[in-house]
Amino acid sequence: LHGPHLTIAMTGQAPQRRLLLWLEGCHPDDRAAPAILDLPLRPGTHCGVTPCACACGSYVPRSVVVHVSEVEPGSALEKNFLLRGGVQDETGSVSFGSELRGRHVEVNLVKGWKLRFEVLDEIDERRSPPIAFAEIEGEELARKPRWRLLLSDPRTSEAVYCTPPRDATAASDGRPVVRRPAFLFLRTQIPPAVKNSNGFGSAIEISMEEHTAASASQSRPEPLAPAAAARRPKVMLITRGTRGDVQPFVALARGLVQHKGCDVVVVTELAWKSFVKAGTKDMPAGSVRFRPCGGDTSLRVNSDVARLAITWGQNNTALQALMFSRSEVE
């Protein structure tokens, strides 16, 4: 703990760029705002039991902790901090109190290192796994000053959804109730390192406008003019699976941009974000965007049970149909 902020420092590294992170609503310039939206509620005490063990359908808001950690690829070295004080309301929104106001997490920007955000219930944070998590590379976070990260189930990597209203199967206008995915909201800022008189680096914060301009100045083809971009056809490509399932869609996205003048959104599992970005990095800025859909097929198909099912299912139509239907349900 260093004064008004938390620091995740990488040992054995030369001085390098740093990134400051705030939960939404905790930045000194922020108005009060939730840091998490649509987090599922905890089973409640409607029947006098906590957690509720019957089918009464009651839920109560949680006291929430966000665990921030960064681990070097291939290493057990981990730096982590707990951000406490999150209070959930009945809609699933989580806001953090004044004790975190102005306090930030500071990380070094090291290529390949990821930040992991785990959302825990404060009541049983030591006994139970996280409710949800999000992961992203530190260098990716530095690209822009505001982020909305999809929260996933740590057991399945599927998206986490809000708790549906009790006994509600349709909205007032007759439409079915749509369960919304949960998101974590962050703010970032880059403090450029400068040499002072004793040779050590010191941090000077820059404004959000300068941060955005610096991120946009990275070498990449120029974006299209707004008027031209508005007239371009919009295409969304949705796929899930292993790399062999995703790669054709990356090629298709490139072709749609180059030969049909389209703007493309590729929706697939978060594990393939870097693959999609690398395969389209020479496209005009903004012409190919990535959006996560949750899930991790590679993790599933590499399990012993999955390999056995794949082996048996090669010549078993019924088993193949069962596997595909289960995938569609998820």
Image: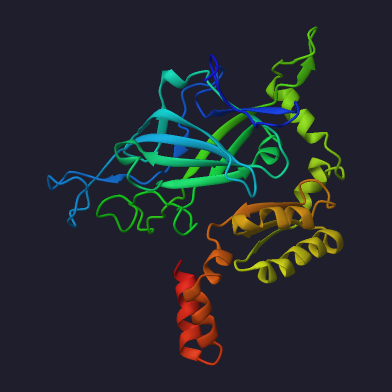
In this view, which residue lies farthest toward the bottom?
A: 315
Q: Is residue 160 left or right of residue 20?
A: left
Figure quadrant of residue 167: bottom left
**Residue at the outermost top position:** 197
Q: How many marks?
A: 0
Q: At x 80% / y 46%, what residue is drawn?
A: 285
Query: What residue is at 45 percent from the left and 35 percent from the top?
Result: 66
User: Above or below — where is 178 with respect to 70?
Assistant: below
- Give the percent coordinates (x, y) of residue 52: 20, 50
Q: Is residue 130 above or below residue 324?
A: above
Residue at the left extreme of this rendering: 48
The figure's colour scheme reads rainbow
Left or right, residue 267 beside residue 152: right
81 with respect to 206 (left or right): left
Question: In the image, residue 78 lies at what x, y percent?
Answer: 56, 39
Q: Residue at x 62, y 33 (%)?
A: 146
From the viewer's side, name the closer residue of 221 and 120.
Answer: 120
Q: Is residue 194 left or right of residue 239?
A: right
Q: Position of residue 47 (x, y in %)?
A: 13, 48
Which x, y percent locates residue 181? 46, 50
Residue 123 to residue 237: above or below: above
